[in-house]
Image (tube, rainbow, N blue to C red):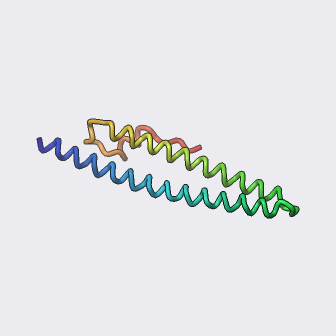
Amino acid sequence: MIAKFDAFFKKRMETEKLLQGLEQRKAELGHELDGLKQKAIAFNLASGKTDVKKHVAELDRSYKEYERKKGLFAQELERLRAFIGRDDASEPLAERAKEKPVAAK
């Protein structure tokens, strides 16, 4: 009985840590998206200038980085969903994550 309570509280603590990390990443993605919007606006304003290629390249690079981070965020959400669905919470998520590393794109 005590082991079940212990496992429940471990799972709850691990879930809370994951949620905090996801919230932080969500906020970072929001800031990056705002930055992309600002760059797009600046691009529109600078479209008459000669350095358009530079602005397009910078915007494209920033967008690709945003998409990469968004993909990592989605993978972390999937890991959280899988973790919450597990009955066995005796092994911390950090240990299980070593079994399935998240591939960076």
Between 94 and 14, which is closer to the camera in this rendering? 14
Left or right of 82 in this view: 2: left
Q: Which residue lies at the image location 25% right of the left edge and 48% below the top edge? A: 10
Q: Which residue lies at the image location 59% right of the left edge and 43% below the top edge? A: 105
Between 49 and 12, which is closer to the camera in this rendering? 49
**Looking at the image, is 58 positioned above or below residue 1?**
below
Location of residue 42 in the rendering, given as x and y in whole percent from the top left corner: 74, 63
Location of residue 63 in the rendering, given as x and y in whole percent from the top left corner: 66, 51
Q: Which residue lies at the image location 77% right of the left edge and 60% below the top edge? A: 43
Q: Which residue lies at the image location 44% right of the left edge and 44% below the top edge? A: 77
Label total for image: 0
Location of residue 60 in the rendering, given as x and y in whole percent from the top left corner: 72, 51
Left or right of 91 in this view: 75: right
* Quadrant of the rendering where the N terminus is positioned: top left
Left or right of 47 in this view: 29: left
Between 104 and 68, which is closer to the camera in this rendering? 68
Location of residue 65 in the rendering, given as x and y in whole percent from the top left corner: 63, 51
The image quarter in which residue 55 lies: bottom right
